[in-house]
Amino acid sequence: MSEPVSTIDGWYSLHLLYSVDWAGLRVLDKDERNALTDELQAFLNRQEEVHEKHEGDYAFYNIMGHKADVIVWLLRPTADELIKLELEINKLAIADYLIPTYSYVSIIEMSSYLGGNKTPEEMMEIPHIQQRLYPSLEKSKFICFYPMDKKRDLDDNWYMLPMEERKQLMRDHGMIGRKYAGKIKQYITGSQGLDKYEWAVTLLSDDMLEFKKIIYEMRFDETSARYGVFGDFYVGGHIPNDAIADYFG
């Protein structure tokens, strides 16, 4: 039996994606629509206060294409807080015009593949690792979110590889990501036992082209080329809190 890798875990993560019932919104008069957007903006402003206190975080983006219209990404120290937040969203008046299209439950993680000989406890003391596990999200112009698995097919079974081979593959994989430091912020969330796929990746950048570049380059790395299985990609642009009324108007 191959040895499982240990992980250090950070904040709980919830991605919520919705399509907007634009036809329903159009029949509302201006005052009704303003009441909906004012309430949503107040909700997002409360999330901004949490961000400023570093007690969790959030992101709100418009998704391009027909798979969804908006994505809400929520981060909190506990699963209970995310459950309450999702319920709070469901009780907003504008929720009557938001059609759920996809969701993803996971936890920000970092595996010990990249930790060398350090124990998880020692890794937790490193500042940049704490920043990855408990991030302060930059409101970059663009977001790219996608779920993924590692293959378990016959000879291409990631989970049957020896630990040292997996470590080397992940180190090589990570070196590609380092080339995009300063251009892309990458967040890995683990979801084994929590959702359909095993991980989700969320990328933030001020240049959407960087998403294409890094994903394409990583396709040629053995970790992705041989063992990667990917779900749908969701890409979109940031909606500032003070632009909520314009977006839904």
Image (tube, grey):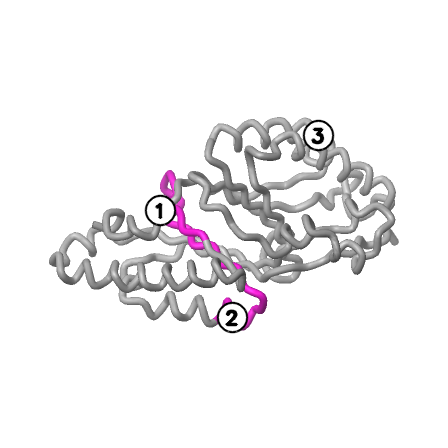
Disc 3 element: loop
How crowded is the residue under tag 2: few (<14 C-alpha within 10 Å), some, or many (20+)? Answer: some
Of 40 and 63, nearer the camera is 40
**Quadrant containing the N terminus in the rendered view:** bottom right
Going by the image, does 198 lie left or right of 120?
Answer: left
Which mark sits nearer the N-terminus, 3 or 1? 3
Q: What is the three-letter code of the residue carrying label 1?
A: Ile
Q: On the image, numbered disc 3 is attached to which residue?
A: 221
Going by the image, does 104 lie left or right of 95?
Answer: right
Q: Nearer the viewer, mark 3 or mark 2?
A: 2
Q: On the image, numbered disc 1 is attached to which residue?
A: 239
Name the residue located 25 percent from the left edge and 58 percent from the top edge.
37
Q: What is the three-letter code of the residue carrying label 2?
A: Glu
Q: On the image, numbered disc 2 is attached to which residue?
A: 81
Which mark sits nearer the N-terminus, 1 or 2? 2
Which mark sits nearer the N-terminus, 3 or 2? 2
Name the residue located 75 percent from the left edge and 39 percent from the top edge.
170
Q: Nearer the viewer, mark 3 or mark 1?
A: 1
State the extent of the magenta-drawn residues as a range.
59-83
